[in-house]
Amino acid sequence: MWRYIMLGVIPLRSAACLAVGSELLGQYRLDSNSLRVTEELARFGVRVEEKRVLGDDVDCVADAIRELLEKVDLVVVTGGLGPTADDVTREAVARALGRSIDHSAELESWIRQRYAEYKRPMPDVCLSMALHVDGSRPLPNARGSAPGLLVHVGDKILAVFPGVPREMEAMLESDLVPELEARCGQKHHLERTLLLGGVVESETEARVRKLYDRFGRENVTILASFGLIRLVLNAEGEGESVQRQLDEMEAAFREVLGHDIAGVDATGLEEVVVNALRSRGQTVATAESCTGGLLGAALTEVSGSSEVYFGGVVSYSNNAKESLLAVPHDVLVKHGAVSEEVARAMAFGVRSRFASNWGVGITGIAGPTGGTDDKPVGTVHWAVSGSERTWHGVARFPGNRSVVRQWSVNAALDSLRRRIERGID
């Protein structure tokens, strides 16, 4: 439909992301597009040096585009391409580059065709989406009606996509990736993430530090989150050499970290647990107090969990613990609901009630109230029950109520993961 002429092939090395939309500056919506863009650029060794979020102000957006093009090789703008008055990105691009912007009959025809496919009449306000910045290449939108645009500015590239994530992702693959392949050659940057459970950031750093001299500190990133560690390994090269580098790095880190590594490129411990159960033909049920069903919710987020997750009991009150899980009344009276004894009884009770291979129990004080000198806020007990025995764990987790509850879920999942992997039930 549209043709353009590539300039001289000069490698792209640096990039910036600019998200446009006043709604992104409020408390209800975040810019997630830059995460996906960064992920794609990393495959080609293009480093994102800056991210910005701006409101719907044409002058501010134009100034930002102009400034970023002076600093980096590639600028990716998302948002502000719709038909409403606050969609100012096209005009901002024209101002930033000092180029004219005119109505395009070809773009209008394409937009009208899109609305015809939706079996809807095209409102007149949508004509604003048919504006064309001189020297740009319009990008058809396979999943929407707002076209994007791509401009070569000397040796640099300005790519502008809609803000709707699914529309942006389609254009990213169809229009920007070919540019990256042409400008970055066969040299690719790949990542591999090792997921660790039951460890903390400082401990992990101390154990892997000796590997930095071998692989380069810049090629290892440690990300900590509520009892989980994501160890991101990076490698850059051509062809199969990148995979070989990552394989060598993973082997070295496995030798140091051992069973603390729960999975590779996994979304979370829940995915690891579900896959481990499926591969062994085993099942689990959950009993939760302070987490209020978060453990069950995490497991059911994983596709295929219906094969291994029998169900759960949210036993917030002592009566529920007694009637639904058969926790002995005298145990509750003697030790209190937040105790090793009750966590063990909950895990055993839910496994028996659902006739599953495994039972998991969690009880604690998430706060901000309810703590005592003996059992301060953040105190959590969890237990994993198998056919032969029941394992127990306890910790005082830091943070607010939400954080304590997430720590608790991850601690329980990691305990279950370790029991399953060792084949002891």
Image: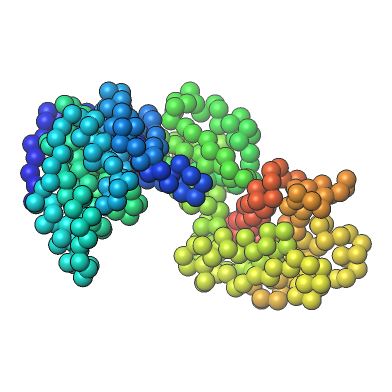
Percent of width and height locating residue 44: 29, 36
Residue at image point 48% right, 44% down: 26
Counting labels gives 0
Q: Residue 356 occupies which quadrant of the picture?
A: bottom right
Q: Quadrant of the C terminus?
A: bottom right
Asked whether, in this view, residue 336 is left or right of residue 183, the answer is right
The residue positioned 60% from the left and 64% from the top of the image is: 296
What residue do we see at 62% from left, 45% from top?
Answer: 226
**Residue 186 shows in the view:** no
Nearest the eye: 70 or 83:
83
**Residue shown at the point (75%, 75%) measured from the top left:** 324
Q: Quadrant of residue 210?
A: top right
Query: Where is residue 95 drawn, in percent x and y?
Result: 22, 32
Left or right, residue 362 beside residue 334 = left
Residue 321 appears in view: yes
Figure check: 90 above or below 323: above
**Residue 112 appears at what percent x and percent y?**
15, 60
Residue 375 in the image, given as x and y percentages of width and height: 84, 49
**Viewer-proximal residue, 74 or 89?**
89
169 versus 241 height, above or below: below
As rendered, which of 134 and 189 lies closer to the eye? 134
- Tell me which colouring the rendered structure shows: rainbow
Pick whichever, 52 or 314, lies toward us: 52
